[in-house]
Amino acid sequence: MGCRERAAKSDLLRIVMNKDECVPDHRGTLPGRGAYVHPAVVCLDLAVRRRAFPRAFKAQGQLDTVALRHHVERMAPQ
């Protein structure tokens, strides 16, 4: 969604919408529509800037991605 590059599903992070917040779904078992991004801050920022999450989840307005961004920052290699 962010960088629009293709990758294996196992290399991507699944995101689902919970109320008005985007949350990570590591096991791929949370209910609902999923959106996939690379687990990198750059890719996440591109998706947010392009307003890709509201489009993917067919939601009205902006979705909260602050907790998702903190999660991706922790996942990134140091």
Image (cartoon, helix red, strand yellow):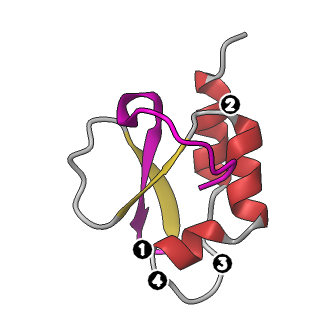
Magenta highlight range: 1-20
Position of 61 compared to 23: left or right? right
Residues at marks 3 and 1, CA–CA distance in whole angstroms: 12 Å
Q: Are marks 3 and 1 in contact (CB under 8 Å)?
A: no
Residues at marks 3 and 4, CA–CA distance in whole angstroms: 11 Å
- Along the polypeptide, which appears first: circle 3 or circle 1? 1
Position of 70 compared to 32: left or right? right
Type of the residue with mark 4? Lys
SS state under label 1: loop
Residue located 51% across and 60% down the image: 22
Type of the residue with mark 3? Gln
Residue located 49% across and 72% down the image: 56
Residue topped by disc 3: 62
Position of 30 compared to 13: left or right? left
Q: Residue 13 lies in magenta, yes or no?
A: yes
Q: Which mark is residue 73?
A: 2
Residue located 60% across and 49% down the image: 67
